[in-house]
Image (cartoon, coloured by chain):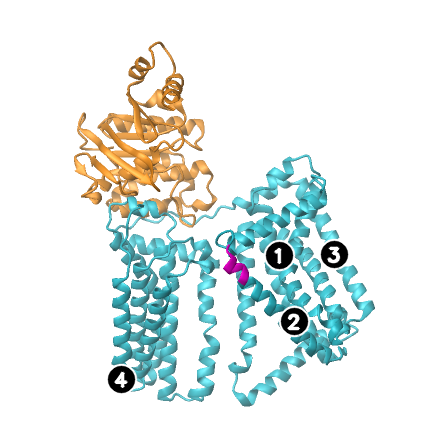
Amino acid sequence: MLRPGGVLWLLRHELRLSWRGWLSGNVKKRGNFGRFALYGVIALAVLGGGFGLAQLLGAFEPVPTPEVLGVVGAVFALIATLMLSQALVLITDALYQRGDMDLLLASPLPPWRVLLVRMAAIALNVATLYLIFIGAITLWLPFSGGWRWLGFAPAVLALTLLVTAIGLVLSRGLFALIGPRTTRVAAQVLGALIGAAFFLLAQAQNLVPFDEREALFMRALGVVRDIFGNAASPLSLPARAALGEPLALAIWVCVSVAAYVLAVWWFARRFVANAAAIAGMSGAKKRDGRTKAMRGGLIPVLLRKEWRLLLRDPLLLSQILLQLFYLVPLIFILWNNVGDGAFSRTGIALYSGAFVVLASTLSGSLTWLTVSAEDAPDLITAAPVAREKVDQAKALAAGLPVGALMLAPAIAAAFIAPMAGLWLFIGSGLAIMSSGLIGIWHQRPGSRKNFRRRPGQSIAANIGQSFITFGWAGATGLAVAGWAIVAVIPALISLGVLLALHESRKPFELAA
Amino acid sequence: MPADASHGAPALSLHGIAKSFGGKAAVDKLDLDVRAGELYALLGPNGAGKTTTLRMVAGLVKPDAGSVSVFGIDALTDPQAAKQVIAWLPDEPMLYDKLTAWEYLEFVAGLWRVDVKLAQSRAEELLRFLDLWEQRNERCEGFSRGMKQKTALAAALIHDPKLLMLDEPLTGLDAAIARQVKDLLQSRTRAGGAIILTTHILDVAERVADRIGIIQHGRLLAEGTLAELRGRAGGGSASLEDVYLQLVGAAA
């Protein structure tokens, strides 16, 4: 039995909150055995992957050459950046969003203890994912002969403490400068960008022509070797620690623990001395310039409202625009493998198809936000306007920006082949319209805050949406390639599926 | 202020209105009339069916049975016409965090198709009255609970509704603004508008309501002026709280 109010008791409270927060986001209802079975399979896969990697590492001696130090150092730098964005979000949540700091600080517990435990829980939260993966490898290392790689796990754990310390100091400065809310958004956007950068890095070999790949790799290796590869430089310390150099590991762990303790002590002193002032920062008010003259009309006010909500949510906007980012490798793959860098008809046809897929995906996401993720559905229902009209205006608000975005590739294609531009314009327009209509017919109510975890459509609607998207993409590609007659077939399939989705729609009904 | 609401005409008529959720009756064949120029307070314990009743009138919930008439308009067959003269203010304000108070009023005015110039002058008048003018260009996300409530109230009034339905309207308002709101509500009823409000603050109902209805288990237990309710509860000079507790306790 843990003593109430003690460090371990508080830590258990923090970890329980984290665990339940994770469960509420990932497990739909209690006793969901199917889901837990899935997690079991994932755990087995992670352990299996860990076993494979441990066997691989067992075959290599971790010799700290400048190249190896450079690569390991770069991996640590990337992990640290990801950890930092996560730590900033968690610190903001733990201190300002969860809303229980007043309760805890009003209790007779010493404030430093509350903060110490909360920060420890943040460090644990940040470390969990990495420790699971690294743990799955470390578990097998003694049996695979790779025991010299055992320094990796403590080195990463120490990195977590150091990153939490940096996050605390940085967050204190950012809170004062831009307020906790903006700090949180900035950290989330940073995390998303780093994630996308990881993806692009993984796809790097597809981004450059085949004959330039080796040179690029050597250049990148040279850069990381210059930064992290010098064993005399403190920047090589985490890599040397991870590679099992005992003294380096001891220094690295000591430095990280000292930095963590100092940062928590410094932060706790400031927080406790001026808790009210810091808490007051959460309400940083945003002024939007001078009063604008009102403009009327149902469609214009709906369009303006939807666009304002989208533009004023940088996190949401970044998540949507990242979908563009993920298409970059696809375009390069097409360029390298099919177009061969030249403006061939087939190349343009494939680009056009890819852009139609992009238009459909983007407008599908935006339509979900405008139609299904309405923040004040009761207000809209209570208004004296036809629901269909509102939904159409909202789908229009989603489709217009995507249509405008698609103008650029359509114009670019028109410069190469005028008809190609026209077909791309028509194809993306039809894809946008289809996504909008499906978004209206098969609404999936949810909160825009949960954009990434938005409820899915029915399986039929999902398959239908994919058929329609690829149907329009295929039709556009074929038309651009000069086979307009053949393009009629996928176009008709798209229309047929759209009609079927129209028939299977659920009409809007008031609460039953 | 409401222009053509004729004094004494029925502003809201509910006849045999019923609604069940999962087989449990939330509102059970309720009959209720609110006259134009009247402030009607609907009281009842938690879960009595007050909010469901108001949501059915606002067109947010479809009744299982019964009829709803708003100033002679059948709200079930012609909901759009009925909604045009209704305003509904729930206890949780329906706001958009990323819009400013001014933009929110512009949006609501657009939904109710209020003339732009009129909307602008009304928005200014309401925001000044509710002491929100200085904050008109701030986003609602930074507002306190009371400021959100006032912004929602301003939006509810922007189309000059003939029937105003308020669910716990004074929650979160400071004493001075609460007083102003009460004065505002009374001035609207004097001009011929009708107001139906639910509240748990019985003092408010006692002071501002022309008539009071007490509802429990989806049925109307008692209805009338405070004096009439006192009469039903045994007379004397009992407060509304005493009368309410006696009637609700007896029916439980």
Chain for mark 1? A
Q: Which residue is mark 1?
A: A87
Q: CA distance from mark 3 to mark 4?
A: 67 Å
Q: Residues within 10 Å of mark 1 (few under 14, many from 20)?
A: many
Q: Residues within 10 Å of mark 3 (few under 14, many from 20)?
A: some
Asked whether residue A404 appears in the rendered view, the answer is no
Same chain for mark 1 and mark 2? The answer is yes
Quarter location, residue A45: bottom right
Q: Which residue is mark 3?
A: A259
**Residue at 19% across, 31% down:** B5
x, y (%) of residue A263?
A: 71, 52
In terms of depth relative to the viewer, which is nearer, A32 or A100?
Answer: A32
Nearer to us: label 2 or label 4: 2
Which secondary structure, mark 2? helix
Amino acid type at mark 3: Ala
How would you classify the magenta stretch by its main secondary structure?
helix
Q: Which residue is mark 4?
A: A486
Is A337 left, or right, of A250 in this rendering?
left
Chain A colour as displayed:
cyan
Q: Which mark is residue A494?
A: none
Q: Which residue is mark 2?
A: A50
In terms of depth relative to the viewer, which is nearer, A173 or A497?
Answer: A497
Q: Which residues are magenta?
A: A32-37
Which of the marked residues, 3 or 2, is nearer the chain's N terminus? 2
In terms of depth relative to the viewer, which is nearer, A19 or A372?
Answer: A19
